[in-house]
Image (cartoon, grey):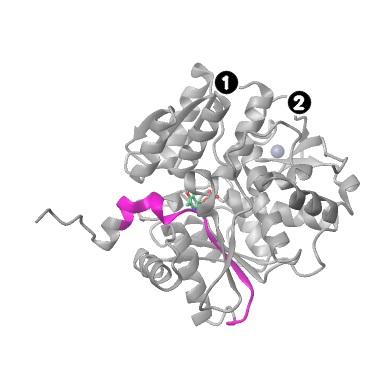
Amino acid sequence: MVKHMPTIKHLECSRCKTHVSAEEPRTLCPTCKGSLYVRYDLSPLRGARDDIARQAAKSPWLGMWRYRSVLPEAKPVTLGEGWTPILASKRYPGVLLKEEGANPTGTFKARGLALAVTMARHYGLRKLAVPSAGNAAGALAAYAAAANIEAHIFMPRDVPFANYVEAIAYGANVTLVNGLISDCGRIVAERKDAEGWFDISTLKEPFRVEGKKTMGYELVEQLGWEYPDAVFYPTGGGVGLIGMWKAFDELEELGWVKPGKKPRMVAVQSAGCAPVVGAFEHGKNASEMWEGAKTFAAGLRVPKPYGDSIMLEILRQSGGIALALPDEKILSSLKDWARNEGIFLSPEGAAATAAYAHLLETGYLKPGDRVVLFNTGSGLKYTDVTALAMQIDRPAAA
Ligand SMILES: Cc1ncc(COP(=O)(O)O)c(C=O)c1O
Ligand SMILES: [Zn+2]
């Protein structure tokens, strides 16, 4: 075994850099309400990369916990998340699709919630609450069931039906709200103290980012410890984008990645809800509330992400871009990848593939550029919304 497991040194505010201890559960920075990052002393792990990879190869399947040496020391609540396939496109040289639909509950949300629930159990928390666009709710419900912790879920009434059914099946307390994730967030904030809920909203606690950072470690390891030229990420709340960038910073601190330029980060949204794109294009440091958000890519319906400033900074630092595609383009990319690659993308994943095609057309990318496109969820979680978009009805019996 690699001997050095990093204990958490402290939590650090992403805004004012205040340090707070991780001895007790934390939500936001007590000084300025910024999101908190987990910081470790990584120095004992410099040089441990190949040992860790060798151990992982010899062990039974570890999933994202192959990176336990750079995660908090706690007994994992696991359902088999992470170490998802990275698939070469049959048509576009250089394009790799990170297939997050292979995760438990069918989306990348499993990574963040596996870690958040692991830490909740570690701290002895009994009641977790989350506002969700849908898939975080399903993932929380599953991991909370596995850990025997209560899950209180608030999501829009019109979430993909699978999200509602899975949350009920896992035994969560589910409330459907007439509104968007922002309205759900308000309800959780209003009720959490009276109810004794711990709020695990996007970027309002430090461990969902920590779980999702494993996507950054993984794609670099799967590329032979090298960076791709660009990473396309369907962006709602931004946890994955922020987590992967943290991973790249850590990989450099650890000396685990071949020296090179960090990838350009490409944040993809739907034209029906594009607050990050709006702020990026206007050179702003924060987004404005997007009114009347509407898209069949349900995970992208986040009208005012809490982590907007962090995302915008990452996009600029990486030399990346934020762009939005109309739902028609997203749907045609979804159909294209299903028919020509055999991959049933989530609408969010199809936003990434549509964005890739668009940026090839504009010349932002060259055909051979090595890019990783995130299919953040399985298309199978969206049969109702995709059927509606494709106008598929079950034929009546003859
Ligand atoms: C399938 C899918 N993709 C992307 C997103 C956006 O994720 P993030 O909040 O990390 O930006 C979500 C969020 O609900 C989602 O469910
Ligand atoms: Zn702060």
Residue 230 vs 288, above or below: the answer is below
Determine whether, in the image, residue 373 is placed left or right of residue 248: left
Element on which disc 1 rests:
loop
Bounds of the magenta segment:
366-386
Respond yes or no on whether mark 2 lies under 8 Å from ligand 2. Answer: no
Question: Mark 2: which secondary structure?
Answer: loop
- Using the image, tell me which numbered label, if any, was put on residue 181: none
Q: Is residue 27 visible?
A: no
Identity of the residue drawn at 90% across and 45% down: 44
Residue 108 spot, x, y in % from top left = 55, 49
102 or 12, which lies in front?
102
Residue at image coords 35%, 46% = 160
Is 250 within the magenta? no
Query: Image check: 191 left or right of 8?
Result: left
- The residue located at (69%, 62%) in the rendering is 222
Q: Is residue 331 left or right of residue 256?
A: left
Percent position (x, y) of residue 214?
A: 67, 50
Q: Amino acid at mark 2?
A: Glu
Q: Identify the image quadrant of residue 157.
A: top left
Q: Decide whether residue 375 is among the magenta residues.
A: yes
Q: CA distance from mark 1 to mark 2?
A: 17 Å
Q: Which residue is mark 2?
A: 23
Quadrant occupied by the C terminus: bottom left
**Residue occupying image coordinates x 33% and y 52%:** 383
**Mark 1 = which residue?**
126
Count of marks placed on residues: 2
Are dots 1 and 2 in contact, CB under 8 Å?
Answer: no
Query: Mark 1 vs mark 2: which is more N-terminal?
Result: 2
Q: Amino acid at mark 1?
A: Arg
Residue 315 visible in this rendered orientation of the protein: yes
Q: Where's residue 136, x and y in %?
A: 49, 41
